[in-house]
């Protein structure tokens, strides 16, 4: 419990510094600034694997799943790479949402900041629920595995002409029934008062739509990482580090999303692999290094192919 509390305290300190110090004044985040922060978060995420190794080798720290330190480290890195790769799809959706609601680049970071707080709470609940299900009902592994294969199949054969329109979404219609929506943006405020009535600004609507989309993406990402490990701390920490790095990665990739269009095939390969891994778990267990190597190779291949195709 002490480890969990310390981890959460450190995460919220990072977030407080982010909004209260480094991004206190709304501004347009340049590709250079975003690139630096992306590097910082990725470095911190991989450096945390050293903390994981220490925790699971410390005899005074409870280790209910009995994972060896080296195994815990590999599982954490593998889980982090899975979550990071699946977050890429989130970046495309976020870009569509910001464009649809005409959100100024100056205020996009504020929306993503508050979106992350909601994501941390929801991911925590989902992970807890998923771990309990797998530990209590072993057959849930097959359901999760089949769901991941179905998701990969759906991604492979989806209609390229289908475009996501946030203003046609169910959440947008629900918000409109609860509170009036204005197309007018009042600086960085989520609400504004018009004729004595509170109205939701496009910033608030975009925030809620992003939160709902993250919930939908979590339905894929949480089962995927549970295929690697059911250790709650490893699942949660790798998930959170991937989410924290998502904001800076969005600003870093926002202007060159089209260059990475072939990464979707990497995601399909990863989802297929972890789905199969879950379905055959009672017959064959893939070594940790195999899972890590396959996921890293899939991501690297997708990046290289995307860049080459884009240059052509």
Image (cartoon, rainbow, N blue to C red):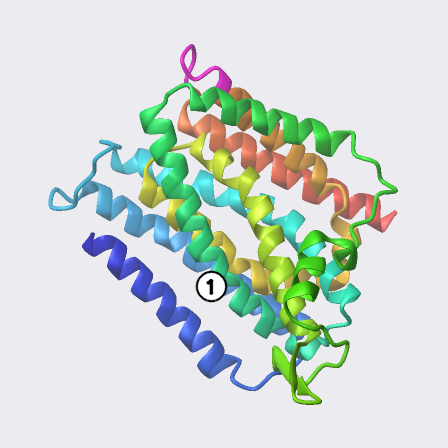
Q: Point out the stretch of residues depicted in magenta.
A: 279-285
The residue lying furthest to the left in this view is 60
Image-based side of 277 in relation to 299, left or right: left
In the rendered image, residue 282, in percent from the top left (x then y), is placed at 40, 13
The structure residue drawn at horizontal position 58% and vertical position 65%, both measured from the top left corner, is 248
In this view, 222 is above or below 245: above
The structure residue drawn at horizontal position 51% and vertical position 34%, both measured from the top left corner, is 224
In this view, 69 is above or below 211: above
Give the quarter of the image for residue 176. Answer: bottom right
Which element is circle 1 on? helix
Residue in front for this viewpoint, 305 or 68: 68
Image-based side of 8 in relation to 156, left or right: left
Q: Residues within 10 Å of mark 1 (few under 14, many from 20)?
A: some
Image-based side of 20 in relation to 7, left or right: right
The residue lying furthest to the bottom in this view is 195
List the residue tagged with mark 1. Answer: 117
In the rendered image, residue 20, in percent from the top left (x then y), is placed at 45, 82
């Amino acid at each position: 419990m002490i480890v969990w509390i310390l981890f959460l305290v450190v995460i919220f300190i990072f977030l407080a510094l982010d909004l209260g110090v480094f991004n206190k004044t709304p501004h347009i985040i340049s590709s250079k600034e975003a690139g630096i922060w992306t590097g910082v978060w990725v470095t911190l995420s991989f450096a945390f694997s050293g903390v994981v190794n220490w925790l699971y080798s410390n005899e005074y720290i409870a280790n209910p799943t009995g994972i060896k330190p080296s195994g815990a480290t590999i599982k954490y890195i593998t889980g982090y790479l899975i979550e990071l790769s699946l977050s890429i799809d989130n970046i495309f959706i976020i870009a569509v949402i910001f464009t649809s609601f005409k959100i100024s680049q100056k205020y996009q970071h504020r929306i993503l900041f508050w979106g992350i707080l909601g994501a941390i709470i929801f991911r925590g609940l989902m992970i807890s629920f998923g771990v309990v299900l797998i530990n209590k009902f072993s057959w849930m592994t097959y359901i999760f595995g089949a769901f991941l294969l179905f998701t990969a199949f759906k991604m492979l054969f989806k209609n390229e002409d289908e475009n996501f329109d946030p203003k046609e979404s169910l959440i947008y219609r629900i918000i409109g029934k609860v509170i009036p929506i204005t197309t007018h943006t009042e600086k960085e405020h989520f609400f504004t008062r018009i004729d004595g009535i509170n109205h939701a600004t496009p910033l608030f609507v975009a925030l809620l739509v992003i939160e709902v989309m993250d919930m939908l993406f979590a339905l894929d990402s949480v089962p995927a990482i549970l295929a690697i490990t059911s250790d709650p701390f490893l699942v949660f920490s790798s998930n959170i580090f991937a989410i924290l790095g998502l904001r800076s990665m969005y600003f870093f990739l926002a202007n060159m999303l089209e260059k990475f269009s072939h990464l979707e095939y990497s995601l399909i390969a990863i989802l297929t692999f972890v789905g199969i891994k879950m379905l055959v778990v009672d017959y064959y267990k893939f070594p940790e290094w195999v899972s890590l190597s396959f996921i890293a190779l899939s991501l690297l291949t997708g990046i290289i192919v995307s860049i080459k195709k884009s240059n052509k």
